[in-house]
Amino acid sequence: MVYKSKTQKTYLLTPVALFISGVLSPFAFADDTSLEVIEVHGHAQNKHLALGSSESLLSDLGVDFSAAGGVSNLPILNGLMGDRVKVLVDGADVTAACANHMNPPLSYISANQITSYNVVAGVSPVSAGGDNIAGVISVNSISPQYSDSSELSWHSGYVSAKYSSVDNGRKLGVGARLASDTFSFNYQGSFSDADSYEDGNGDVVLDTLYRAQNHSLTAAMRDDKQQLVIKLTHQKIPYQGFANQYMDMTDNTSYGAIAQYKRSFENSELEGQVNWHSVKHEMGFFSEEKTGMMRMKTDAQDISTQLKWRIALDKNSSILLGQEYYNYSIDDWWPGIEGSTMMGPDDYVNINNGKRERIAAFAEFESQINTKLWLNAGVRIESINTHVGEVQSYNDGMSMTDMDDMDDMSDMGSMESMTMSDTSTDNTIAAENFNAGDRDKTDTIVDANLLINYQITNYDELQLGLARKNRAPNLYERYSWGVSTMATTMIGWYGDGNGYIGNPDLDVETAHTISATYIKSAKDDRWRLSTNVWYTDVSDYIDADIVRSFNSYDLDNTARNIFQFTNVDAILYGAKIDLTANIYESKQLGNWQLHANVTNTRGKRDDTNQPLYQIKPLQTQLGISQQIGRFDNALSWQWVDTKSRVDNNRFENQTGNYSLLNLSSKATWNALTLSAEVSNVFDEYYQLPLGGVSIAALKQDSSNGFEQLAGQGRSFNVSASYAF
């Protein structure tokens, strides 16, 4: 991997080294004239053409995604998904405030707002972020740009637009900046609107439509030693379909504020940050593609502070000290439906006054010991407290097991034939038991890492990493108390159609990871080969055990399970190979590069050898790019193997192998950039290995059972960006 700097110099740095030297260095007056990324050598990025979800940017760095909504797919690193991946947006830790994780951190920022991003999978420095076992994804939009004049005046701006045929997708991005030599004001906005996309057979993949808008306003001021930045954000998602969930998003309205202060001293650098983020989230139904009446609401807030102080010990060594505080609060309730016997007369209180508080401190030593050896070592200690108040069911005075003849299950809009006679313990009793139990738990965890880079020769590099990392359960894993089929199927971010019950006795996940990377480059720098192997042993991995089964449609292919979260031991391991090579260069035909990679990941439970859920099968990518004059052209091919290792407990579907061919061309004339692309050129039908099941299709025609969600068919995409 290489780092493209703002001056377009190329540095052969590891992702970890880049993360520390580039991101964690607390005092830097940057601009965003180009995009800072960890990227495959030779792939230039234009942030003004990147619109919509950040998924396309991060996928190039080896991040997989579990399918959800159009802007809400969940990142997966080394086979680990959800909260196991720490995602930081402008350094802020934003929590998914939804029983289905419909509003994960990356959903709050659009690609055109991102000025830098990086990914550190597996072994990450303790300063990169705690409370994770998979690694850290960091995206940044705060990059003040100043002018040479003392007068505040117009500095720069842009307008970008994109259209995609497969989903009639329309995306728009705008930016405007005023600046002087000491002040900078920047606005960034985006709008996305898409219909449900078509698969390779030309059929509509139901309930994949969405609409979203994001706005941010950043003000910055500086002198020669310090900088203060304040950023305000707003997001509005009026609707977003989730084909693999029983409900959809009908509103997500959020506001946020970030204040960053950085100051440099003679031998040290100080950075402080305060974050606030508030969201009102609602689930329900908005489209004829999946109908119903039930509603779910959440109000949530994240408040956090971070303080970092880097002290130079000598010319080549430093120590970084940090203290962090995070406070997350949430109320989750399901309004009673007027006239409904089952879902009323009271509100169903799922999480009442939920709190998740983290207090962390860390120390990290970094040293360039000699010209060949670089070292990073750190220790992080966190105290994590979770607590919720008392809850209630829809009807505290009636046992749902006495309602065998109920016929209003259509209120849910997803499981019409379901009755409450499938469990001997109703939600009323479950609420009483939950309220009588211990709902307050504190965990103390210790993270540690050791990272070594050894330059064997000028053309050979060895990277070794060891880490102990921990993650405490989230509030839904610990405190989702409902036991009925309806209540349990509202919980879970897996897209599998099953139901989940929380477990207040869950322990912290603890992962021990070892990673080794060998990098070989040619003497003339015409090619570069990187191979990586890693192994992770997880104690108290949060999985789920079967409580009972249910079958809403009484067909052989519509059975599902209800689970309770539990701790098990698990093992994950994998290997990656990346190759970049300059294959041809001439004045007439331009510069040609080859990019290739192969990735394979495995994961299993120790006790049963059962494969873990949503582990992507073997995949390969091959691309050829050409740069000639003002044109950049690319041809890429992706092949994904058959997914045969599946989690049978969750009824995970097997998927067939498939290959996708993509073509793209981009031309730049000073301030104007135009791009044309054909994705999935041969319009191949394929099912997403990480897509989950299509509940929307099941509701339209239950005879096919829980089919795997299909991927997008051929799409003709055009985009334009004009900078001014």
Image (tube, rainbow, N blue to C red):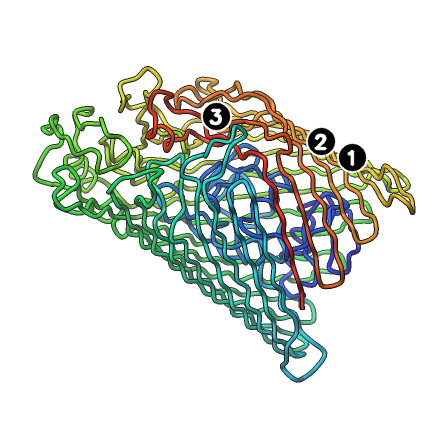
Asked if one can make out residue 457 in the rendered structure from this viewpoint, the answer is: no
Residue 529 circle label: 1
Q: Is residue 366 left or right of residue 624?
A: left
Cβ–Cβ under 8 Å for marks 3 and 2:
no
**Residue 672 position (above or below residue 425):** below
Left or right of residue 350, residue 592 in this image: right
Using a 10 Å C-alpha cutoff, classify the residue at mark 1 as few (fewer than 14 neighbours), some (14 to 19) or many (20 or more). Answer: some
Instruction: Give the residue drawn at x 11%, y 29%.
Output: 403
Image-quadrant location for residue 423: top left
Q: Is residue 108 left or right of residue 328?
A: right
Q: Position of residue 34 (x, y in %)?
A: 70, 59
**SS for tag 3?**
loop
Q: Is residue 5 visible?
A: yes
Distance (Cα) linking label 1 and label 3: 30 Å
- Say few, some or many: other residues with alpha carbon within 10 Å of mark 2 (under 14 / 14 to 19 / 20 or more): some
The image shows residue 335 at horizontal and vertical percentages of 21, 48
Say which amino acid is labelled 3. Answer: Leu
Residue closest to the eye, 620 or 387: 620
Most extreme residue toward the bottom is 151
Name the amino acid, label 2: Ile
Q: Is residue 217 above or below residue 466?
A: below
In which quarter of the view is residue 400 placed? top left
Residue ID for mark 2: 577
Which of the numbered marks, if any, corresponds to residue 612?
3
**Image quadrant for the C terminus?**
bottom right
The image position of residue 486, as x and y in percent, is 24, 33
Estimate the spatial distance between the alpha carbons at disc 3 and disc 2, rounded to whole Å. Answer: 23 Å
Amino acid at pointer 1: Leu
Q: Number of marks in the image?
A: 3
Is 153 located above or below residue 661 in the figure? below
